[in-house]
Amino acid sequence: MARIVVIGSGMGAMASAARLAVAGHRVAVYERAATYGGALGRFERDGFVFDTGPGLLHLPAVYRDLFVKTGKEPLERCVALTPVDPASRHLFDDGTDVSLPNASRAQVVSALDAALGVGAGERWGDFLNRARDAWDRTRRPLLEEPLRPDWQVLGRDPYPSVRRRRVLRRDQWAATVGEIGAWELADPRLAALLESYALAYGLDPRSAPAAAAVLPYMEQTFGSWYVRGGMRELARALYERCLARKVEFAFGAEVVAVTEKDGRAAGVELSDGTVVEADSVVFGADPRALAGMTSGRQAWAPGDVEPGPVPPGRFTVFLALRGGRPDGTVHRTVVHSPDAGAEASAAFRGEHSGRPTITVLRPDDPVTRPDDAHEAVTLTATVAAHGPVDWTDEALVARYADGMAAAALPAVPDLRERLLWREVRTPADTAAATGAAGGAVPPPALAGAEGRHLHTANTTRLPGLLLAGGWAHPGGGLAHAGMSGALVAGLVVEGDGFRGSQ
């Protein structure tokens, strides 16, 4: 039985802790914050409840597998998990309004044809078929296996783009999400739909490889799911599963150093000087922070995938509304920006957009409101991280929140008349709560683009030190974080010979 120290209590870190404890190891988690969950936080006021992180779960099989493998109670006995149908409603600047059914390719095609014109659904369906090919080619090496030493093989884009012939009569393959939208989808609204998926995951449609097509494929194939009481309940269930497996937690315990002995990780040192010995250490945060915790050396070796630029963050507005949620209200509405190019440029150049794409969440969940005479609504936009933009500037924050509320009016027409109060969370707040640099949110790993969208491997150049969570392979997002926990546990239990789940 080995002693394992886990640094951080985000979803990837707790997923690894639960699996390692079931494997017979003694696991202790040290968390600098006062609670567990990482990005899956919660804000409560006057009987209203809001998620401060992701609002929906995609690819729930990851957590179903985790709960089956770590205890007798399956996921659905620990949380009330329900599909969201329709999965999303989309409002475009020209007045087009289309709702996409949950996990039904045929119904999505029909809905797009009805709203955008005959042929639009077929083009989207053909695109999803190509996206399925990319998913099938990369699912195992990108999501279910540790990052291979020859990770460069994933630098080739697996998306089978449609050939296009240019004036100079040279065949060229689409290389980015933006090119797919312009050439293969043809309709600017379909292009905006595709680009909104990329941007929501913190990817720039102008440079993200065509392989990002797996993101809408994943959502529209495996569905969108909501946890009653908010997504924080998923973190609560995983925390309780860890406790049931005898994982120990210490909150308000900041790790300042990873100790070494005989050339391998040997434990951690806390800010109060306490030294905790361990046979292995799992780091559940941005690996860039390890340079100051491991004798000043980087955790990755020359030739490994190195962390990329700091990605964007999220600007969130919580709205407490008087009046009940109207019948037939859609859970998730996306109000598209009139200028997606300017929006992406602002988010990735360190500026603030005049009119971003807004995601409006209106869950039909009594737990989120004081009674049926009120409604809790969340607005979210992808924005530049804190630093390039000063998200502590109160005047800027107020103007941006006002602009998001105005942009959300097509989805919530009576918002102004019903508003009781609002609360705002910026990337600066995310940085303070989670320790993520600039309040950035890690995107999922993607094949293509010569490996620029891969994440640092779960193993490091220091034996016994492993990386879990959204900042490590296979990247950000609830499902991907859960996968990282499974990979780390496999590497600890089976060693370097571990090749992923079968």
Image: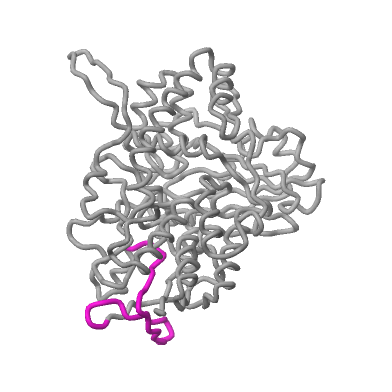
Query: Is 64 in front, or is 44?
Result: 64
Q: Quadrant of residue 483?
A: bottom left
Seen in the image, is 437 located left or right of residue 91? Answer: left
Residue 64, placed above or below residue 494: above
Query: Is 132 in front, or is 402?
Result: 132
Q: How is the image coloured?
A: one colour
Residue 251 in sight in this render: no
Q: Which residue is drawn at 26% across and 83% down?
A: 261
Seen in the image, is 425 located left or right of residue 385? Answer: right
Q: Where is residue 295 in the image (x, y as percent from the top left)?
A: 25, 76
Q: Residue at x 39, y 42 (%)?
A: 203
Residue 268, placed above or below residue 431: below
Q: Where is residue 4 in the image (x, y as percent from the top left)?
A: 41, 76
List the single residue furthest toward the front: 502
Q: Does the magenta stretch include residue 285?
A: yes
Q: Quadrant of residue 458?
A: bottom left
Q: Position of residue 390 (x, y in %)?
A: 44, 53
Seen in the image, is 173 located left or right of residue 482? Answer: left
Residue 442, placed above or below residue 449: below
Q: Which residues, given as a range, are shown in magenta? A: 261-287
User: In which quadrant is the N terminus drawn?
Assistant: bottom left
Q: Where is residue 338 in the image (x, y as percent from the top left)?
A: 49, 28
Query: Is 206 in front, or is 410?
Result: 206
Q: Is residue 422 magenta?
A: no
The total of numbered circles placed on residues is: 0
Residue 47 in sight in this render: yes
